[in-house]
Amino acid sequence: MAIFGSVGYGLRSGILGGPARATQAASPLLFGLLMDRMGIGVLAISAGLSLSALVAPLLLKARPVPCAGGGIAKQSAVQTAAASSVWKIQRCQMLRGRKRPRL
């Protein structure tokens, strides 16, 4: 909601999540077809994809972001792309103990 706003949020999240759901639905069929063609060798491909999915988030680095009023907060590249100035101020206040996060 921070990126697109609250109007039409459900539609946008459905459009953005649609390809992921389609891929998840098609993967068992594709894995079965690949297993018919390659046999047990398909497990090497599956293991390689699983390891790459494990390593990819580990390669993301947190970058320091200057807080209003001094101090540094660390956030990931994804958070940096979606962060607004209000979010940065609230995050800095939470890190300094001035404000409790809303649940």
Image: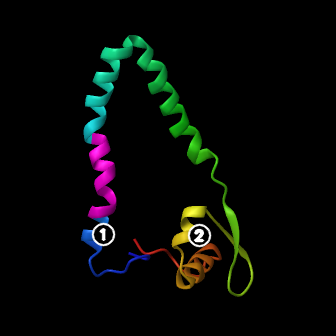
Q: Is residue 92 left or right of residue 72?
A: left
Task: Provide the major secondary structure of the magenta segment.
Answer: helix
Say whether residue 16 is magenta.
yes
Locate residue 96, reporting x and y percent: 65, 77
* Residue type at numbered disc 2: Thr
Badge 2: few (under 14), some or many (20 or more) residues near its Cα, within 10 Å? some
* Residue 72 image-quadrant placement: bottom right
Is 28 situated above or below 61? above
In depth, the one of 101 and 63 nearer the eye is 63
- What residue lies at 44% left-to-right and 26% top-to-bottom? 46
- Residue range corresponding to the magenta coloring: 14-24
Q: Nearer the viewer, residue 3 or 66?
A: 3
Q: Secondary structure at mark 1?
A: helix
The x, y position of residue 15, in whole percent, is 29, 63
Residue wearing tag 2 = 80
The residues bearing labels 1 and 2 have C-alpha atoms spaced at a distance of 20 Å
The residue labelled by disc 1 is: 12
Residue lying at the far front of the rendered structure: 37
**Quarter holding the C terminus?**
bottom left
Pointers 1 and 2 in contact (C-beta within 8 Å): no
The amino acid on which the numbered mark 1 sits, given as a three-letter code, is Arg
